[in-house]
Structure formats: C-alpha cells, structure tokens
Amino acid sequence: MPRTMTAVIAATLAMTLTMPALAKTEKISGTTCWTGTLNMIATTKKDMGWGYALDFTWLTDDHDPKQSLSGHCIGSGGMVAGKYESAPYFCTVNAVDGSKYMVRGMGGPKGSKGMLYGGSGAFTGVSGTVTGGPRIKLPAPKGRLAACRHEVVERTLPD
C-alpha cells in the first residue's frame, strides 16, 4: 500500500508540473480620450475620404494609474453617397512600465471593435478584444479632432 500511495503522489506531482500554465484573463473598463490631425479629400459633402493620426489616454473606471494606458493610432474612413464607411485603425498601446501591445480594428461614431496583438514586456503573448461605445465628439480647432468613448478591454496573457 505505501508503494501504491507513493506512486500515486509521484504521478500526480509529475502531471501537475507538466501541465501548461493557465492563461490570465482580465476585463477592464475605462474611458479613452483622444486628439489628433485629420486630412480630408472630398468631391461633395456626401462623398469623401479621410486619414487621421491621434494620441490618446485611457483612464480606468477605478482611476488606477497602473492599469491606465496611453498611445498613438492611425486610421482612415470615408463617406460614399452620404453613407459612413467603417474606419480601420491601428494603435500602439503603452503601459506605465514601458510594456506595449497593438490593437487593430474598425470604428465609427456608434462604436468600435478591436483585437489585441503583438505585445512586449508584461504584454508578451497578449490576445483579446476592446469594444467601444458611442463616440462623444469634443470641440477641436479646424483640421484637428477630439473625442472620447467608454471602452471595455478583455485581455488574456499567458501565465
């Protein structure tokens, strides 16, 4: 019996040590505000295209500076016959410790959806999504844009 018990304990320990680590998933919500430049081309008020570059800050709902982020995005969009075309975007996201990841997605006045990828530092191996609510347009000088939106980030990191 003692040999059987020892074998069971050894097998359990071996399986535990060889099991892959569980990934850590977190869900964080906050508000992103941005400002940037806007370059437009148009033939009419209903037919146009634009490109933009913006800088943003993201403050968590609980105002935790360790979870809050900043970054830079580029994107484009347009209108065809007065109908808004979703705007693709790419962003770098920076944490206070210098770790980074990328987000790519589509956005518009009613909301945005993006995917997380390409992490470094604490974000190495990151995956997940970011979902944004309606855009709140803010006043900005001509040729610039400014706005905010509430977002939820679901981020998975390997353990």
Image (cartoon, rainbow, N blue to C red):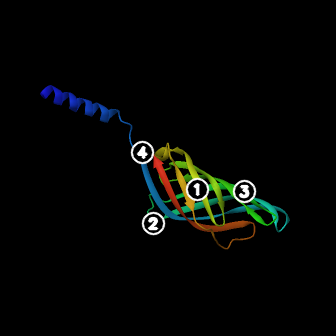
- The residue drawn where x is 21% and y is 31% is 8
Query: Label 1 is placed on what type of residue?
Result: Gly
Mark 2–mark 4 distance (CA, rounded to whole Å): 25 Å
- The residue drawn where x is 36% and y is 35% is 19
- In the picture of the structure, the residue carrying the numbered disc 2 is 63
Q: Which mark is residue 76?
A: 3
Q: Quadrant of residue 150?
A: bottom right
Where's the N terminus, which quadrant?
Answer: top left
Q: Quadrant of residue 23?
A: top left
In what element is the residue under mark 1?
strand
Mark 3 or mark 1: which is in front?
3
Mark 3–mark 2 distance (CA, rounded to whole Å): 30 Å
- Pick out the residue farthest to the top: 3
Mark 2 or mark 4: which is in front?
4
Q: Are marks 2 and 4 in contact (CB under 8 Å)?
A: no
Query: Label 3 is placed on what type of residue?
Result: Ser
Mark 1–mark 4 distance (CA, rounded to whole Å): 25 Å
Where's the C terminus, which quadrant?
Answer: top left
- Pick out the residue farthest to the bottom: 139
Residue 50 image offset from top left, x and y in percent: 76, 59
In what element is the residue under mark 2?
loop
Q: Are marks 4 and 3 in contact (CB under 8 Å)?
A: no
Q: Earlier in the sequence, mark 2 or mark 1?
A: 2
Seen from the viewer's position, the closer of residues 90 and 23 is: 23
Mark 1 or mark 4: which is in front?
4
- The residue carrying pointer 4 sits among few (fewer than 14), some (14 to 19) or many (20 or more) residues within 10 Å by Cα, namely few
Q: Which mark is residue 23?
A: 4
Q: Earlier in the sequence, mark 3 or mark 2?
A: 2
Residue 127 image offset from top left, x and y in percent: 51, 47
Q: Earlier in the sequence, mark 2 or mark 4?
A: 4
- The residue drawn where x is 69% and y is 71% is 140
